[in-house]
Amino acid sequence: MMAKTHVVIGLTFAVYKLGALQTGQYTVPEYGAVLVGLVIGSLLPDIDHPQSTISQFIPIVGRFIAAWTQHRGLFHSILGVILLFLTLAFGSGAMVNISASYGLGTQLPRYFSVGIIIGYVLHIIADMITTNGVKLLYPLKWNVGLPLFSTGGIREMVLRWGLIGLSVAMVVRFILGYIA
């Protein structure tokens, strides 16, 4: 799927979780950290493709990774999710110290990491419903998926705009519920 659709999927999930602000499950900064993490995580698996949005944003890393791995391989697999989780888990100590030193508190990096993981997994699920599928059980060569969409096809565009419409409806409902 294209980057726009992946971001819309991540943002739709974030909008779905807006109610967590009302219930006090998240503070606004924590919700913001999850939101930013969702956007980054929704783009991150495509770091293995040199023309992807995230590879264009950090081209040296994107080219390096694309040179030694196959698109929709390691970074679109359960192993990739586990490696990301471990990277974030071990790197969160440094992020917590940096966050605390700027007066941002110690929980924001954890919420940011949660957003990244959720966005990453949503990206893989979205790619699983394309005609190409993903190598979910990498390093096994099997493609796993349910071919409902072609990347860049009309069905993908309908899905994207449908999710945008759903998100707008959820935001309006949230605002009206908040006002009433």
Image (tube, grey):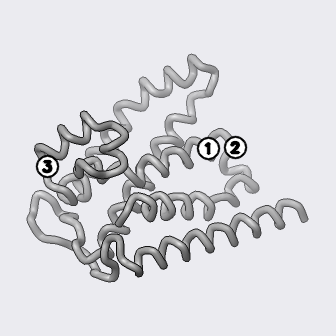
Q: Which residue is mark 1?
A: 32
Circles 1 and 2 in contact, beta carbons < 8 Å: yes
Q: Assign a secondary structure to mark 3.
A: loop
Please report the residue visible at 37 percent of the width from the left and 40 percent of the height from the top. 57
Q: Quadrant of residue 3?
A: bottom left
Q: What kind of residue is marked 2?
A: Val
Q: Does residue 81 appear in this view? A: no
* Image depth: mark 2 or mark 3 in front: 3
Left or right, 143 with respect to 93, comes to: left
Q: Quadrant of the N terminus?
A: bottom left
Q: Assign a secondary structure to mark 1.
A: helix
Q: Which mark is residue 138?
A: none
Residue 114, percent from left and from top: 47, 47
Answer with mark 1 or mark 3, whichever residue precedes in sequence. 1
Q: Assign a secondary structure to mark 2.
A: helix
Identify whether 88 is placed above or below 140. above
Q: Which residue is mark 2?
A: 28
Circles 2 and 3 in contact, beta carbons < 8 Å: no
Q: What kind of residue is marked 3?
A: Thr
